[in-house]
Image (tube, rainbow, N blue to C red):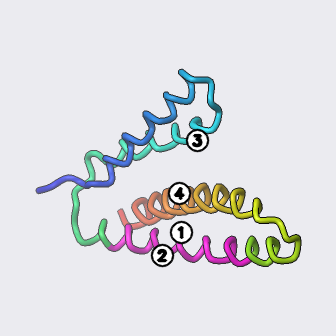
Amino acid sequence: MKTSWIKYLGFLGFLGLLGILTSNLGFLGFLGFFSFFSFRKIINDERLERNVNRSGRNAFILSIPVFVISTVLAALMKDISIYIYAFIVTVVLQISAFSLSLHIYEKGEK
């Protein structure tokens, strides 16, 4: 059987090491991607595909209110730089929601 392809997201963690080497704190958030290496022994089957789809849906639904709120704030305050912070918050929320949801779905069905 084939193992899961999600483990390859762990290689994004090496960007976090770049943040340590260059003293750029912006890259340190990538260190959390090393946790995806824990999926290296999970078999790629229909259950995993379903759980990945459900986790992706949760992350997408969570990102919609952030974009709506940031668009309204940018229009009211007439400040375009709000989109920069909204993008950062959205990426962090999506990765966190996906990871947490996938972990809960995988542990809940065993």
Q: Is residue 52 left or right of residue 19?
A: left
Q: Mark 2 or mark 3: name the one nearer the start of the chain.
A: 3
Element assignment for label 4: helix
Q: Mark 2 or mark 4: name the one nearer the start of the chain.
A: 2
Q: Which residue is mark 3?
A: 29
Q: Mark 1 or mark 3: name the one nearer the start of the chain.
A: 3
Amino acid type, mark 1: Ala
- Depth check: give the residue in front, 65 or 103: 65
* Residue, far left: 1
C-alpha span from label 1 to label 2: 5 Å
Q: Which residue is mark 2?
A: 57
C-alpha span from label 4 to label 1: 7 Å
Amino acid type, mark 3: Gly
Q: Is residue 80 left or right of residue 59?
A: right
Element assignment for label 1: helix
Q: Is residue 24 above or below residue 97?
A: above
Q: Mark 4 or mark 3: name the one nearer the start of the chain.
A: 3
Q: Which label sits on residue 95?
A: 4
Q: Is residue 50 left or right of residue 107?
A: left
Q: Which residue is mark 1?
A: 59
Amino acid type, mark 2: Arg
Residue 74 in percent (x, y) is at 80, 71
Q: Mark 4 or mark 1: name the one nearer the start of the chain.
A: 1
Q: Is residue 41 above or below residue 54?
A: above
Element assignment for label 2: helix
**Quadrant that contains the C terminus:** bottom left
- Write the start and end of the magenta stretch as one range: 50-68
Residue 76 in percent (x, y) is at 87, 76
Residue 3 falls within the magenta-colored stretch: no
